[in-house]
Image: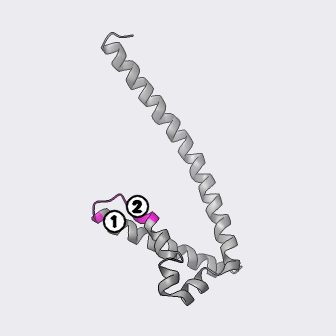
């Protein structure tokens, strides 16, 4: 798979996600909702229905293997980064609960 196709896919995906995130953020929604909506916009439901030839060229079958592999690596890295932050949040919450219980003399 040519690198240029993968880079073009990444640019289109990132720009669409940022654009939809910005739009929905200004409409009072979290930007992550817009980023998820970008997946629908770029999928076969919207882009594939409105511009089937552009969708077929941009997301051709053989090129999806590299994009899928890159997405899997990104998901694994995200999970490795999210886990320590979750543990930190739980630990801070437990400390706060302990302090509240001591202040109320329940512990």
The quarter holding residue 65 reads bottom right
Residue linked to disc 2: 33
The residue carrying pointer 1 sits among few (fewer than 14), some (14 to 19) or many (20 or more) residues within 10 Å by Cα, namely some
In this rendering, the answer to whether 93 lies above or below 82 is above
Q: Quadrant of the C terminus?
A: top left
Q: On the rendered structure, is 81 left or right of 15? A: right
Residue linked to disc 1: 24
The question of residue 54 being in magenta is answered with no
**Which one is nearer the viewer's eye here, 95 or 28?**
28
Q: Quadrant of the N terminus?
A: bottom right
- What whole-number distance in Å separates the C-alpha atoms at marks 2 and 1? 7 Å
Q: Residue at x 60, y 86 (%)?
A: 57
Q: Residue at x 32, y 59 (%)?
A: 29
Q: Residue at x 40, y 19 (%)?
A: 98
Q: Secondary structure at mark 2?
A: helix
Q: Residue furthest bottom?
A: 53
Numbered circle sitting on residue 75: none
The quarter holding residue 59 reads bottom right
Q: Residue at x 53, y 82 (%)?
A: 48
The quarter holding residue 52 reads bottom right
Q: Are marks 2 and 1 in contact (CB under 8 Å)?
A: yes
Q: On the rendered structure, is 85 left or right of 98? A: right
The question of residue 28 being in magenta is answered with yes
**Where in the figure is residue 11, as x and y percent of width and height?**
52, 75
Name the image colouring: one colour
**Region of the chain picked out in magenta, as a range:** 26-36
């Amino acid at each position: 798979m040519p690198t240029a196709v993968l880079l073009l896919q990444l640019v289109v995906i990132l720009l669409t996600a940022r654009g939809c995130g910005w739009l929905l953020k200004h409409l009072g929604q979290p930007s992550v909702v817009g980023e998820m909506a970008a997946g629908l916009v770029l999928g076969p439901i919207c882009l594939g229905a409105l511009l089937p030839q552009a969708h077929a060229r941009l997301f051709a079958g053989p090129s999806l293997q590299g994009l899928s592999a890159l997405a899997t690596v990104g998901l694994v890295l995200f999970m490795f980064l999210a886990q320590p932050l979750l543990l930190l949040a739980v630990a801070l919450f437990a400390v706060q609960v302990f302090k509240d219980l001591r202040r109320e003399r329940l512990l």
